[in-house]
Image (tube, rainbow, N blue to C red):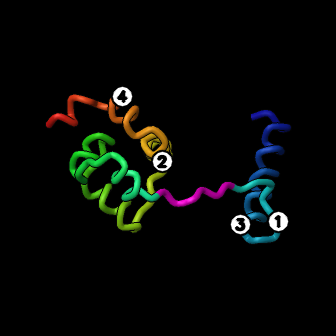
Amino acid sequence: MDEKLFSELSASIREAGAIKRGAKRASRSFEFADVDVLAIRAKTGLSQSQFAALLEVSPATLKNWEQGRRQPTGPARALLRIVSAKPRLALEALHAERLAA
């Protein structure tokens, strides 16, 4: 490995350790508001099982989100934001054939 690259990586690891110990502040951090999955599902008028199928998650996962035991992350969070903003459009775009079931 290139010595300069190794030195940079070592410095990064030491910096991460200092941040974790609280000796140094992170240069940036990200805070995301909790998603109200129950309210989003209510906008769609779908049952839990229908909404879970639409999102392609298990009904148990959806229940955990709705009851606040867990929060959706990553792509699921992004998809829920789309459904919240444009429920009808999202329903039309996402597996319309499943809604008829």
Disc nearer the start of the sequence (1/4): 1
Q: Dominant secondary structure of the magenta stretch?
A: loop
The magenta stretch spans which residues? 30-35
Question: Residue at horizontal 44%, vertical 53%?
Answer: 72
- Of tags 4 and 2, the one toward the viewer is 4
Q: Tell me the crowding category of disc 1: few under 14, some 14 to 19, or many 20 or more residues within 10 angstroms, Cα based.
A: few
Label 2: few (<14), some (14–19) or many (≥20) C-alpha neighbours in 10 Å: some
Residue at mark 4 to residue at mark 3: CA–CA distance? 43 Å
Discs 1, 4 touching: Cβ within 8 Å: no
Magenta stretch encompasses residue 54: no
Marks 2 and 3: which is nearer the front? 2
N-term mark: 4 or 3: 3
The amino acid sitting under disc 1 is Lys
Tell me whether the residue at label 3 lies in contact with that at label 1, contact meaning CB atoms closer than 8 angstroms.
no
Q: Please name the residue that numbered disc 3 is placed on.
A: 20
Question: How far apart are labels 1 and 4 at the CA level?
Answer: 46 Å
Task: State which quarter of the image contains the N terminus.
Answer: top right
Location of mark 4 (residue): 93
Find residue 71 and report its image quarter.
Answer: bottom left
Query: Image quadrant for the C terminus?
Result: top left
32 in the magenta segment: yes
Residue at mark 2 to residue at mark 3: CA–CA distance:
26 Å
Q: Earlier in the sequence, mark 1 or mark 2?
A: 1
